[in-house]
Image (cartoon, rainbow, N blue to C red):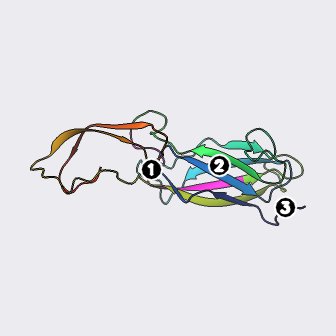
Amino acid sequence: MDQQEFPQVETDKEDYAPGETVTISATGFELGSTIKFEIEDDPADPGDDGDVDAYDPIEVTDGGEGDLDGTENGQVVTTWEVPTDNNGTGLGPPDALNATLNLTATGTGADGSFGTADDRSATTTFTDSFPQSFLTTNNLSIDEIQKYLIVGLKSQDNGDAVNLQNGEFGADRDV
């Protein structure tokens, strides 16, 4: 086997905001094998919604469709989008917000089947923290809580507007 002795999986960053794309790289697997990526909230730190969520697994074949490096080389590169809502409802705190997420990459061995003795796996963790604030009111004179319409841009520089309509905030608060 020409690959690394032990498989590894990693993400391009340690922390993401809701809606960001996680780039995942798995190395040290059998040439041409299929790798299943499973992501779930860490039971000890499931995030703001309090649920231990398990997300839909992603299966990618080394060198095949979905392998962003496009080469059969024992390495698979793929992506996953961090949830922006609660259980696909469009409401509530995002499933992974302020959670630690466990990522497991399991590759089929020479037999090409999952769940057999020659499977190889690797794990890592990453987090989904609340995005950094972009507006501070600490220099404004606000006597009481007031309502504002705020239109800003996401921290990702993709031009998508974020509307925080009728947000209530007072002096010395971050939005």
Question: In this image, 150 relative to 24: left or right?
Answer: left
The answer to if 94 sits in the magenta stretch is yes
Q: Nearer the viewer, residue 109 or 73?
A: 73
Callout 3 crowding tier (Cα within 10 Å): few <14, some 14–19, many ≥20: some
Q: Are the residues tagged 1 and 2 within 8 Å (C-beta)? A: no
Residue 156 locus on image (x, y percent): 48, 46
* Number of disc labels: 3
Can you tell which quarter of the image residue 28 is in? bottom right
Can you tell which quarter of the image residue 25 is in? bottom right
Q: Nearer the viewer, residue 142 or 51?
A: 142
**Which numbered disc, 3 or 1, marks the residue closer to the eye?**
3
Which residue carries the number 1 mark?
A: 97
Amino acid on which the number 3 mark rests in the picture: Gln
Q: Nearer the viewer, residue 43 or 158?
A: 158
What label sits on residue 3 in the rendered view? Answer: 3
Q: Secondary structure at mark 2?
A: strand
Callout 2 crowding tier (Cα within 10 Å): few <14, some 14–19, many ≥20: some
Which residue carries the number 2 mark?
A: 38
Residue 8 locus on image (x, y percent): 72, 61
Question: In this image, 108 relative to 10: left or right?
Answer: right
Amino acid on which the number 2 mark rests in the picture: Glu
Residue 134 locus on image (x, y percent): 34, 51
Q: Earlier in the sequence, mark 1 or mark 2?
A: 2
- Residue found at the very far top of the displayed protein: 89
Q: CA distance from mark 2 to mark 3?
A: 22 Å
The image shows residue 15, relative to residue 69, as above or below, that is below
Q: Earlier in the sequence, mark 3 or mark 1?
A: 3
